[in-house]
Image (cartoon, grey):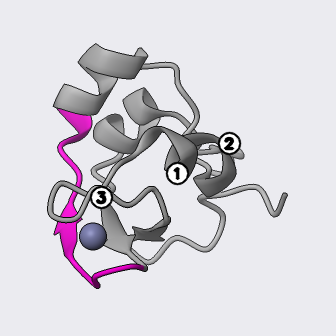
């Protein structure tokens, strides 16, 4: 039952059907990240914690690096991320 799954890598996001949406704080452009493409580029073990991943992202619309990440998992799972 309780396996203490922590979804904090690109691979685990894909495996557990979670999505990440990137939101540009500069121009408010936002889109769902292509986790497959991201994994191929950064490695599937790369962390999806915002502080690790957000600095790697650039807005495709305005080029800003001021990106926020929004976890948009389908299933309600309160234990998906470590707190810090
Ligand atoms: Zn932007």
For the residue labelled by badge 3, is the local secondary structure a helix, a strand or a loop?
Answer: loop
Q: CA distance from mark 2 to mark 3?
A: 21 Å
Image quarter where the C terminus lies is bottom right
Q: Identify residue for label 3.
A: 19
Q: Foreground residue, 11 or 47?
A: 47
Q: Whole-percent x and y of residue 23?
A: 35, 73
Foreground tag (1 vs 3): 1
Badge 3: residue crowd in 10 Å (few <14, some 14–19, many ≥20):
some
Mark before the other along the chain sequence, 2 or 3: 2
Can you tell which quarter of the image residue 82 is in? bottom right
Q: Nearer the viewer, residue 7 or 43?
A: 43
Q: Determine which of the numbered discs, if any, sits on residue 54 in the image.
A: 1
Q: Earlier in the sequence, mark 1 or mark 2?
A: 2
Determine which residue is flagged by label 2.
3
Q: Is 38 displayed left or right of 11 in the figure?
A: left
Residue that lies at the very extreme toward the right in this rendered image: 84
């Amino acid at each position: 039952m309780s396996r203490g799954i922590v979804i904090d890598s690109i691979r685990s996001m894909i495996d557990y059907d979670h999505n990440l949406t990137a939101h540009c704080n500069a121009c408010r452009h936002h889109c769902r990240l292509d986790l497959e493409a991201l994994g191929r580029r950064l490695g599937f073990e790369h962390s999806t914690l915002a502080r690790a991943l957000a600095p790697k992202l650039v807005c495709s619309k305005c080029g800003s690096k001021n990106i926020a990440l929004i976890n948009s998992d389908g299933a309600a799972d309160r234990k998906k991320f470590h707190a810090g």
